[in-house]
Image (cartoon, rainbow, N blue to C red):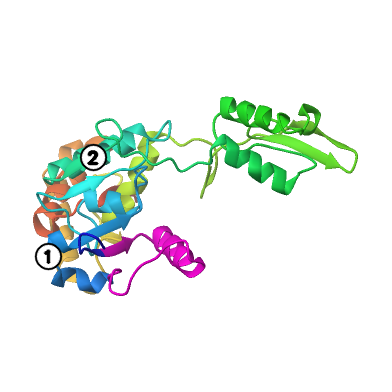
């Protein structure tokens, strides 16, 4: 307001928090301060300040999308200043620094806690934690935020205001805590970890990479029927496209793709016994062709059926 800038709030969680703070009176935004996304195009860069999510490098957050030139409404331009008011959470450093690098590549000037006094702490201080504990006066206490050392420090803080260590439980992921009117105890441990759509446990980097490629460019399955005795094509290949091109609209392109597969296989008839060679030839030929025509790189899966 002091510098006569309009404020644009970007990111769903940020928008929800700002709306809540305005409603409860924690924020004061004079009329005309907050701008709608559709107003951005009519405003000069020096008239705008953007408050957004993504200071921890979350892949789908607003700031990361801006850094990757993937945001629908906001584009970083040379001369922009980006202020990261947080410190990377342990384990998030590579994501945060990659975001910073991508912002610099677009000509932005990035201020963060390593080079400027811009860090704003998002967690309660000890006296605030004591106040909350005194107000709630819990019968049992289980600190849940931070690394193990933080849990211990929080538990000791609770002990300093009268919550005995026998009523305070420091747990690790998977611990089973049983509480009753007379007390509590840890009753065992269960396996824990990341849960993915196809099950439980850690996934290899190559699996996550493949999922990312599938979400971006889709998949193309090329099915070819080969005569077992002669190694010749029985019929034109069949192509199944998912997430790459709509079948009806892409019919001409898919027909060209089938012709290319036929040529690639006819040129390598002597290698029909070597399935890995056939797969490689089909993938390479189609990969180059489809990228030239669509500027996209779908995952290509050749399937050879002997008849």
Residue 211 visible (yes or no): yes
Work out whether 175 lies above or below 286.
Answer: above
Which corner quadrant of the image does residue 44 belong to? bottom left
Residue found 70% across the figure and 29% down from its top = 160
Residue 235 visible (yes or no): no
Circle nearer the N terminus (1, 2):
1
Work out whether 77 lies above or below 276.
Answer: below
Query: Residue 216 vs residue 205: left or right?
Result: left
Mark 1 and mark 2: span between their CA atoms?
22 Å
Instruction: Return the residue at label 2.
Output: 111
Instruction: Return the residue at label 1.
Output: 44
Q: Nearer the viewer, residue 222 or 65?
A: 65
Residue found 33% across the figure and 48% down from its top = 212
- Mark 1 lies on a secondary structure that is loop
Work out which quarter of the rendered image holds the N terminus and state it: bottom left
Instruction: Report the span colored magenta.
Output: 7-35
Rendering coords of residue 56 (x, y %): 37, 42
Rendering coords of residue 130 (x, y %): 65, 39
Query: Residue 111 vs residue 13: left or right?
Result: left
Query: Residue 102 vs residue 206: left or right?
Result: left
Which corner quadrant of the image does residue 13 belong to? bottom left
Q: Is residue 268 magenta?
A: no
């Amino acid at each position: 307001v002091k510098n006569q800038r309009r404020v644009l709030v970007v990111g769903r969680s940020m928008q929800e928090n700002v709306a809540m703070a305005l409603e409860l009176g924690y924020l004061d935004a004079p009329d005309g301060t907050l701008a709608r996304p559709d107003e951005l195009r009519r405003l000069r860069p020096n008239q705008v300040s953007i408050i957004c999510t993504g200071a921890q490098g979350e892949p789908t957050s607003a700031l990361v999308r801006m850094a990757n030139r993937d945001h629908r409404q906001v584009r970083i331009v040379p001369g922009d200043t980006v202020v990261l008011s947080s410190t990377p959470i342990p384990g998030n450093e590579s994501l945060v620094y990659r975001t910073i690098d991508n912002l610099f590549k677009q000509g932005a000037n990035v201020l963060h806690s390593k080079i400027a006094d811009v860090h704003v702490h998002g967690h309660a201080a000890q006296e605030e934690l004591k106040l909350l504990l005194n107000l709630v006066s819990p019968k049992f206490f289980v600190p849940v935020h931070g690394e193990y050392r933080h849990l211990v420090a929080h538990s000791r803080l609770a002990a300093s205001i009268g919550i005995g260590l026998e009523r305070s439980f420091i747990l690790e992921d998977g611990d089973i805590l049983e509480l009753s009117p007379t007390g509590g105890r840890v009753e065992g441990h269960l396996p824990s970890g990341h849960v993915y759509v196809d099950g439980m446990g850690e996934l290899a980097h190559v699996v996550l990479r493949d999922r990312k490629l599938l979400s971006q460019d889709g998949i193309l399955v090329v099915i070819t029927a080969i005569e077992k005795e002669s190694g010749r094509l029985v019929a034109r290949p069949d192509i199944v496209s998912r997430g790459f091109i709509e079948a009806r609209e892409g019919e001409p392109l898919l027909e060209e793709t089938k012709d290319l597969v036929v040529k690639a296989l006819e040129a390598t008839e002597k290698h029909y016994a070597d399935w890995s060679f056939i797969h490689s030839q089909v993938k390479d030929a189609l990969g180059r062709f489809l990228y030239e025509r669509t500027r996209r790189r779908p995952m290509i899966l050749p399937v050879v059926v002997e008849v």
